[in-house]
Structures are given as structure tokens and as C-alpha cells.
Image (tube, rainbow, N blue to C red):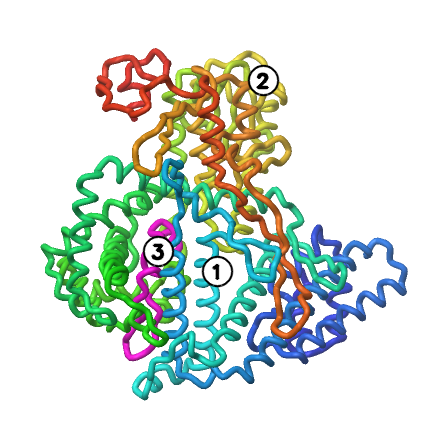
Amino acid sequence: MVALEEIKRGIKNKNEEKVVEGLKNLIKEEPKNIKKAVLMRNTIIEPLNRKCNKEDNDFFIRAIIKVIAEEIKEDNVKSLAYLRELLEIMNSINTIFKSVELNNERLKDNKFKNHTFLQKIHSFMAFFESQRLYMSKEKVVEEGEFVTGMEKEVAKYAVEGREIVVPDRGHLEGLIESGEALYNLCFYEHKDSIEEEFDKSNDWISPYMNPGFEEIMHLAHHRKLLEDIWSRFKYADWKLESKEEVEKFYPNNKKIEAMKHVATHRYTYRVNSIGNNIIKEKEREMREAYTKIVKSSDNITMGLLDNLFRITKEEYLELNYFINELSRASKELLAPIYFDTSISEIKIEEYILGCEYLQTLALIYQEAEKNKFIETENNQNLLVPLVSLDKLIGHFSNVHDIELKKAKQIIETYVFGKDLKLDLFSQPLPYVGGNNVIFSTNLILQLNIFRMIEMLVNKVSSEDVAKKGIQFEKEIREALSLNPHINVNKDALKYEAFDGREIEYDFIGTFEDCLILMEFKHLKVPYTDKERYNSFETLKEAFEQIKRRSESVEKDWEKIKELSTLDLPEKPFKEEKIIKIVCTNIYEFTTLEEDNIKVIDSTSLLCYFVKKNTEVFASDDSVYKRLSLCKKSKPTVKEFLEFLENPITIEPFKKAFSEQLRPIQIMGKEDNIAIYELILKKDPYKEYIKKILEDPKKIKKEPEKIKKKKKLGRNEKCFCGSGKKYKKCCLN
């Protein structure tokens, strides 16, 4: 749009009239969504940009006010909706900028700023690690209760002086997010002097005896919340409502917001479930491996990692067994094609070795903390020792027989604050100068391999994402082909459609008296609002593709019959007999619907068509029950349509969330900003499992303790009831 370029030039040159003219021209162009047009193309000022000042903010506010005044004067009724959006943009920018301005004023007088970069980051990391120690002492599960892995996700900790609650994990994740904001602030202030400062005196300062630390943590947390608000307003279609002198930010579509939260918890549960199965399968080996880790921690001196670097290759391979087995849970979530991917000639599996190496060392050191650390007023630095990158790289190279250059590149991938910028969750080694990092066991152990590799590949790999899509499409089509109750077209279906353009079907099949049209989309797992927005835009393209294929069914039926391997009726399927689906590899958009097109993730889809069971673990690790997830022995269209509306993978979350408004407190000021939050008020799986256990129809009749079953032979009839041999059905 020409108008957007006018606005950009006007802002750059501080030409108010040019900005006004550009905004008025934008209104005349009548875009579908003026907010999206302005925000998505980075046309306006960014209130969180550290270079944005009061003059910039006031300049832009004046321009918008002038546009609104002129449009009202001209009595332009058509422009009213656009003016409301401009007013909302103006108020949001002004609200956020004023908060940033107040924070900056507080920073000027904060005594924490007088310390060196190392002292600041070291203080925070010690505070973070000591908080983890306090929280780890609390009992998470009562004896005899089910262990679902979701216990730390439930919001149960009240915030002092506030009517809000946060989960155990949420508290630590909030600290990491605040730590990243603090690191970025300190880096901005010290970027030209980090190395020089490291060589000077860097006396340790305890966070609990550090003047200004409490305030700086509050300001860092406040900054992170403001970043969240702006990101959601910009990319997630959030709204601003001014009510009772409080600016409230909330989602325009609460259902989409809920989908995001459900997806996050489903990933957590899936990893924990796989991890539980691994521990159960190899219980003896895992116990033996952990015993060796505990024994190895006897050699550790608190505050030093030197004895860790004395671990030989043979010793390391034994000690690494525990972490290596647990990491299988995350690796199972990764698309298989990732394991054929290389970044700078380093295979993904080698990056995973780096993660497992760091976590093995962290686990040993954490065991030493449990047995040897006795806290005093000023010794929290022992929890987070400084470590030389050269020593880490050298030892990693030795235990894995990897050349030094490659080992350096792998380990430095996990360093936050150097060249590659992911986030503190995925790069748990904060750089502090002098080629040193801070070693925080909790930060390293929370590192999620699946998340880290996804972010790494999406950030730096030039691998064609289409390859992942083709592989994904093939796997789902083959899995569905094994089900005897649906008929799947086996060959590619491609032809010139009614509109003169080529058309190709990802999936076409028949199910009872219905036709299934399915579009597959292999998407990046979104970790930011911007990534989620991009994924949503891709879904919109998928909706258009499905609509066109549905139209082609009516207009090109003879071509479809000729090219298809299916046994199709003479006349095309009526619109109401066409089941339209977009199937994705990610959980974020499951149950989304547009124009009668349903979105579902592949895990949920296969959960319906491929009979599955799940196991529930009690706190003593024994299997309590095995549950069947399918209602009937054979799928039906009626039940499938109900399933698309409410997949069994989503059902546990139906009443598990509650809403709350989190006030964003400005120190010394009244709360004037609040942000909408969805919190997990109860463990969804625990409630769901109890409900199922009360219904005997949903429980497979098996002993309370599941005994080892006789292995099903390849040529025996499949357990799913299809009538096919096992080798030709669910074996694959």
C-alpha cells in the first residue's frame, strides 16, 4: 500500500503532515483491517524500542489525534470503524510507552546499575538457582495419587497482595523470562565493556544483600510483561479496554487463546508420558545409572567443576545413560527428517549430544548441591559457578571423540549472549565475558531438546520445509490406509480444474457415505506470537485450498472418477456429505473451524482411527489401569464428526482453566494496566482419569497390575478388530 510508505517516510523524517496524509489515505483505501495493515508492516513507532523517546511518542500521538479530528469534522461515517482501530493503537502505544518511561526513571536511581556486568548476571543466576532449591523441597504428589506429570503446571501459589495464582513451573519460567529481560538490559548498558570489566575486580555480591536487586527484578519482570502485551496486541489480535482507570488487555478471540494453552500442556503431558514409559521399561537400569550419578557427585567441591572435567570417556558413557534415555521422550516428538538435517556440517544428533552432555554434568552437580550445600547469607554463588568455555568444549570433545572445532560450535550453540540468539530457555549458559559462562543446573536441566532443536532448525537451517511436509503427508496417509473402515485414494490425484489451474489433492477418501477431503500442513511449532500469527496465515491458505477442492468435486467429478483409485458413485457428493479437514503436525489449532472446515492435529486424528490405550501411573510407579480411548470397536461418520468437535485429546481440558486479570504493578504507583491470563486451575488428566475409572465401560478388563502379555504374532488377527493380519494392520 502506498499509504503505508507515506506513513513510514513521515515518521522517519518527523513530518507530521505526511503521517496525517498517509493515515487518511490508508482509510480511503479501506483495508479489511487497518490495525493489521499498520502493525504487521512495522509502519509505526515501537513503544518498547530502546531508541524510542518521548518526542517520538508525542509526535505520533499528535498525528493520530489530528486524523481523528479531521475525519470527524468531515463527518465521514465510513471511516468510524477505522478511527476506532486507530484510537486503540494510539492508546496501546501510549500506555506501554508511559510505563517504559516510568521504569527508565526508576532505573536511573537504582543502585544495582553500579555493578559490573558479571556481578549483575551472577547475582540473578544465584537468586534463580536458590529459588529452585526452596521449591524443590515441597511435596508435589501425595502417596497413592496418580502421577500425570502435570502437577507443577497447576496454578496454586497465591501472589502476595494480589488476587491471582501462579503454578510451580510458571514461577520458575517467569524467573527465566525476567532473567532474559535483565540480561538484555545489562547487555545493552555494558555491550562495549563486558570483556574489559571481566578482567577487573568482580567481587561476588549476594542477591539477598544487593542494594537495588529487588527493584531491578521487579522492573525486569515488568518489562517482560509489557513485551508480552505488545506482542499479543500486535500479532494475536488482542484488544485494549479502558475501564475504571485501568487499561485492560485481553484476546479478541478467547477460544484461540485457549487452544494455545491446551497445546502447551499437551506437549508437556506427552513428553512426561513417554518419559514415564521409559522409566518403567528400564526401571532397574535407570536406578543403577542414577546411583552412579549420586556416587560421582561425592567427588564434587561446591563452586568448582574441575572434578567433572576429570570424568573419563568410559565413566561419562555410564553416567550419561540416565539422561540419554530420558531424552528419548523429546526426540520422539521431533520430525524424522530433522535427523537427516545438518547445520554448518553438524548433524542434529550431534547438537543433541551437546545438550545431553550439559545435562549429565548438571545432574551430577545438582546431586552435590543436595548433599553438600549449606546456605549462608552470602554463599549462593556456589550454586552457580563460573566455568571456562574452553574447559567445557575440551571435555565434551574428549568424551565424544569429536574434533575440537566441531565441539566448539556445538557447545557455543547453548551459550546465551554470543552470536546465535535463541532464548534463555534454549541457551542455558549465560555468557559473562572472559570466555566464561555461568553454570546453573536448573537452567540446564529445564532445557527441552525438542524445543531447542525446533528453534535452531527454524532459525538457521535452509532446509526446504516442503520435505518435512511431504514426509508428514506420506506418514499420515499410510497410517490411515491401514484402517479397514475408510478407503484412501492411493495414487496422486492431479488435473486441470474448472478454473483452468492445476489442482492436487493431499488426501481424498471415502468413509461410509461421505467423502473426506484433507489438506496436510507441516508447521513450525510456534513459540512466539509472531510465529503463531505466521502459522495462522498458512492455515488460511489451507482453508482456501480445501474450498477450491470442494468446489472441484462438484464441477470436475468425471475427471476425479477417472483418475481416482476409489470406487466412487456416479454423481458427486453433496456439500453436506463432504468432510473437510486441515490436519497439522502441531497442537496449537486443534478444534479451530472456518466455513465448516475443521482443524485437527495428526496425533488426535490417529487417536480416533487407530485404536489406542493409555496407562495411568500411581506415585509408587506401578501401573494402576490401562484405559481404552475409543468408544466403539469400529469408527462411524457420526462419531467421527463429534470427535472433530471435541477430540479425546482435548476433552480433559474442558473445565480445567479459569480466567484471571494479572495487574502490572509499577513500583510506587497505582496499578493501571492488567493483562488477561488463562490458568490451569486443576490437573486435567487426573480429573479425567478418575472420571473414566468410575465408568467400567471405558476400562479394558485387565488385572489391576498389568502383567507381561504374550507377544502378538505377525500373522495373527490384529487386536483392533479390523479382521486383518497384525503385520498388515497396526504393526506399522
Q: Where is residue 255 in the image (x, y as percent from the top left)?
A: 61, 42
Which residue position is annotated with label 1?
A: 174
Res 594 → quadrant: top right
Specify the amino acid type for callout 2: Pro
Work out whether mark 1 precedes mark 2 in sequence or the reverse, and give the earlier one.
1
Local crowd size for mark 2, using a 10 Å CA cut-off: few (<14), some (14–19), many (≥20): some
Q: Is residue 357 visible?
A: no
Q: Nearer the viewer, residue 232 or 269?
A: 269
Work out whether mark 3 precedes mark 2 in sequence or the reverse, and give the earlier one.
3
Determine contact: label 3, label 1, CB under 8 Å: no
The residue stretch that appears in magenta: 429-457
Specify the amino acid type for callout 3: Leu
Local crowd size for mark 1, using a 10 Å CA cut-off: few (<14), some (14–19), many (≥20): some
Q: Residue at x 26, y 40 (%)?
A: 279
Work out whether mark 3 precedes mark 1 in sequence or the reverse, and give the earlier one.
1
Disc 2 on helix, strand or loop? loop
Which residue position is annotated with label 3?
A: 447
**How far apart are the alpha carbons under marks 3 and 2?**
52 Å
Which residue position is annotated with label 2?
A: 572
Determine contact: label 1, label 2, CB under 8 Å: no
Q: Which of 147 and 268 is in front in this view?
A: 147
Number of marks = 3
Res 15 → quadrant: bottom right
Q: Nearer the viewer, mark 3 or mark 1?
A: 1
Specify the amino acid type for callout 1: Gly
- Asked whether, in this view, residue 496 is left or right of residue 705, the answer is right
Q: Which residue is drawn at 29% across and 67% down?
A: 374
Q: Residue at x 29, y 79 (%)?
A: 434
**How far apart are the alpha carbons under marks 1 and 2?**
55 Å
